[in-house]
Amino acid sequence: MKILILHRVPYFKIEYHRGISHDRHEVTYFGTDKALDTLPPDLRCERVSRPGERPAFEEARDWLAEHPRAFDRIISASEYELLDAARLREHLGVPGAALDQVALARDKVLMKEAVEQAGLRVPRFLPLTRFLELDGRVPWSGRTVLKPHRGASSEDVLVFGTPRQAAAAVTGRRTGVARLDAGAGLEDFQVEEFVSGPIRHFDGLVQGGEVLVLSASEYVGTCLKYAQGESMGSFQIAYSEETRAWVSRALAAVRIEDGSFHLEAIVDEGGNAEELVFLEVGNRVGGADVVATVELATGVHLPSYELRVLLGERIADSLPEPPADRRWYGWFVHPGHHLAGREYRGLDGTLAFRAGPRVVTWHELPPGAPLPDHITYQAGETVLAGIVASGTPEETRDWMTGLFGSLSVRTRPAAPTSPAPTIPEQVSA
């Protein structure tokens, strides 16, 4: 089989060799030099460099116009290039999820419309352009979220006290989001009511519309607060058959039929019983250490089995059994992007946690390392990332909240990158 991979996610995050036999198949990786540099040097494959100045679809289309060839599968593991892969499949007539199907799992307005039509609760929402036409006069009155249709990592996400405040900030061009304040990109944003409650994420694997693997977790902190400089993580929890059925209905609504999924929901505790409120979903693996914690708990490496699904292999009978000794895992990260421009010197308040028996992995930046200039959950880039395990979900949660309450980051002003200009002495006559 001839396979084209739009390569953006660092290789070690996916480990393509675990799901694709590079000896049996002809595999081509198409990506920027930075992405291609993450490939193992001895991996049997073709490497094709692209400039990275335009969307992956456009650069791949132009490359193939000059070097025509056929592929049996076109795959992307990156949320940012799922649509590019779908466009390229459509352009070349290659099997796989269609463009309109992929768009349902990328556009937050389309997905909420589809989930609501399936009878599941979603936050009340509107495209930003329609919201502005109504001048913020909407069916809810409390906190209001402004977010991009297709964003990730809570970049450019804002929370306002009321809908009218959100409308005034956008029309007054004082949101702090550069493109909105320049009067551009309104069609790329939406608003929705803020629903209070714990946020959970569900991760797993689906084939032919059947959920084969499911893991449930609850966040400590939020992606939005992480973007603002606070710690976050999540810990695995048990789930009911009713929850499993809810996840299946949400996936079916947005036509996620094959591959990995990462689904987020808010637990509304305002009624007599908990109610899940759909937030968003992706046809991809979760970020941070979601893949590692799911594998530790279930024995399933999601990217590997997703690749097998995308190659058309039936996997239901080949999934490993979960470990006999059930442990409850969690992942944690502490950001550094909000401190960009300063020199990292170390962490305080973490010794008791780092040396404890529950730590599975602990990745801390070495003193003097550069701090990231962008939001990242990646070990080796952000200040701290790791995995913890305990005998119960509550123990994992409490360990994590204790760490977050104890740690602090030491920094100092970064040394100048070039010598300061010499100022001539002033000599009086």
Image (cartoon, rainbow, N blue to C red):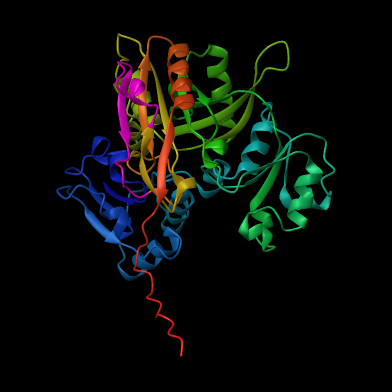
As drawn, the residue found furthest toward the bottom would be 429
Residue at x 57% of width, y 42% of height: 104
Report the label total: 0
Is residue 210 in sight in this rendering?
Answer: no
Residue at x 56% of width, y 36% of height: 225
Residue at x 36% of width, y 46% of height: 9
Q: Is residue 357 on the magenta stretch?
A: yes
Q: Is residue 111 above or below residue 296?
A: below
Q: Position of residue 35 (x, y in %)?
A: 31, 53
Q: Is residue 367 above or below residue 321?
A: below
Q: Is residue 116 on the magenta stretch?
A: no
Magenta range is 348-370
Return the residue nearer the eye: 238 or 76.
238
Is residue 219 in sight in this rendering?
Answer: yes
Q: Position of residue 425 (x, y in %)?
A: 40, 80
| Residue 321, quarter of picture | top left
As drawn, the residue found furthest toward the left would be 42
Q: Position of residue 372 (x, y in %)?
A: 41, 49
Q: Is residue 187 above or below residue 119?
A: below
Q: Position of residue 207 (x, y in %)?
A: 42, 29
